[in-house]
């Protein structure tokens, strides 16, 4: 029986895949399989994944770029592990990463996901730096989400095991049973997100369904982060567009009426700032609002689906 299915979604990641895939294949202490879902790469990503795997990696080729969430959903459907490890192509795992997280979750049947301690990486070998990349996700009072410890000095920080809001999608472990319970019409990960914030959405949905998330710092990985809030002006228009769109999708999917009431003033204030930026300095993100309006009926139906799942889980 497969313990852990390691799934990498790639899009023009020829340079990084040999490192991330090699780290997936060296996972010890578990029976693992590795799948690479290629999102219509135009470089040598498929060849790089196959070369790094020496026949031990399944490469699923997509004829178009369907986004991270939809591609990850395909990988989950095609895999068979008790646990799913969503791994970014620019992330390298220590050899015991999957075994440590899986063993902790085996002892906690209420845990739907788990995060290790991700350090910021640099260079072609994804070498570790002295800074934290993510110690899991936390959520603010206004519904925003951030990586704990992002950019902070790693020495002596975030070394205690604890429950957290959710794992970073760079290297998050998920219980298949939890994913099945949270699956909606648009997948395990909500494919409407396309890219960016989909890990926070899934974390929030799992939490609303009663699943816990464990932070286990002895499981270590190294991630070269491309997108950070302070780099927004340098991020691609596509990423910024989906960032704006998905900010509202997060709340549409997951926010309760009581949460809306409790956070209304700071949330609306922040929304006005976002709208103002889209009207002035980031006009490429303005279509996010028209997308939300055009899809409002379908999005509301999806919210009703999610809320019904939550009601059923609370009664069971």
Image: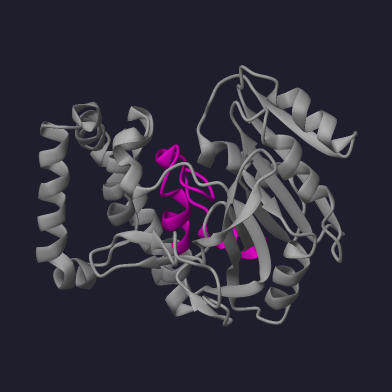
Q: Nearer the viewer, residue 269 or 96?
A: 96
Residue 151 in sight = yes
Q: Which image quarter: residue 242?
A: top left
Residue at 83 percent across and 48 percent down: it is: 25
Above or below, 281 relative to 6: above
Q: Is residue 210 above or below residue 177?
A: below
Residue 95 painted magenta = no
Is 201 within the magenta?
yes
Q: Quadrant of residue 120?
A: bottom right
- For the rendered model, the colour scheme is one colour
Q: Residue furthest right?
A: 55
Q: Residue at x 80, y 60 (%)?
A: 95
Residue 273 percent location from the top left of the image:
12, 48
Q: Position of residue 156 (x, y in %)?
A: 55, 78
Q: Nearer the viewer, residue 143 or 309?
A: 143
Please name the residue shown 31% across and 40% down the image.
Answer: 232
Q: Quadrant of the N terminus?
A: bottom right
Question: Measured along the vertical axis of the image, is residue 252 above or below residue 37?
Answer: below
- In this picture, which residue range is highlighted in magenta? 176-203
Percent x, y for residue 195? 45, 39
* Res. 298 in view: no
Horizontal arrangement in the rendering, residue 164 relative to residue 270 (left or right): right
Quarter of the image holding residue 58? top right
35 sits left or right of 180 in the view: right
Q: Position of residue 192 (x, y in %)?
A: 41, 39
Instruction: Give the residue displayed 34% in from the left and 42% down from the top.
Output: 231
From the viewer's perspective, tell me whether residue 292 is left or right of residue 203.
left
């Amino acid at each position: 029986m497969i313990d852990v299915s390691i799934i990498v979604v790639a899009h023009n990641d020829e340079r990084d895949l040999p490192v991330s895939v090699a780290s997936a294949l060296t996972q010890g202490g578990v029976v693992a399989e590795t799948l690479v879902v290629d999102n219509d790469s135009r470089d040598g990503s498929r060849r790089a994944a196959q070369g790094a795997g020496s026949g031990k990696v399944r490469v699923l080729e997509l004829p178009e770029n369907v986004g991270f969430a939809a591609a990850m959903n395909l990988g989950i459907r095609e895999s068979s592990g008790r646990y799913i490890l969503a791994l970014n192509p620019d992330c390298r795992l220590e050899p015991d990463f999957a075994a440590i997280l899986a063993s902790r979750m085996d002892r906690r049947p209420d845990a739907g996901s788990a995060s290790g301690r991700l350090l910021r990486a640099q260079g072609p070998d994804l070498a570790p730096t002295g800074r934290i990349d993510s110690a899991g996700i936390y959520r603010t009072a206004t519904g925003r989400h951030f990586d704990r410890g992002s950019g902070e000095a790693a020495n002596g920080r975030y070394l205690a095991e604890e429950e957290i809001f959710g794992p970073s999608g760079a290297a998050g472990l998920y219980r298949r049973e939890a994913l099945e319970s949270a699956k909606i019409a648009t997948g395990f990960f909500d494919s409407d997100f396309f890219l960016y914030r989909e890990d926070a959405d899934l974390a929030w949905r799992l939490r609303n369904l009663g699943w816990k998330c464990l932070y286990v710092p002895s499981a270590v990985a190294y991630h070269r982060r491309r997108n950070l809030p302070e780099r927004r002006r340098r991020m691609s228009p596509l990423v910024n567009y989906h960032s704006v769109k998905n900010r509202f999708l997060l709340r549409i999917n997951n926010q309760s009426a009581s949460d809306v009431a409790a956070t209304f003033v700071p949330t609306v204030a922040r929304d006005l700032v976002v709208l103002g930026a889209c009207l002035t300095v980031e006009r490429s993100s303005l279509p996010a609002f028209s997308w939300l309006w055009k899809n409002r009926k379908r999005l509301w139906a999806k919210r009703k689906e999610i809320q019904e799942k939550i009601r059923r889980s609370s009664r069971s």
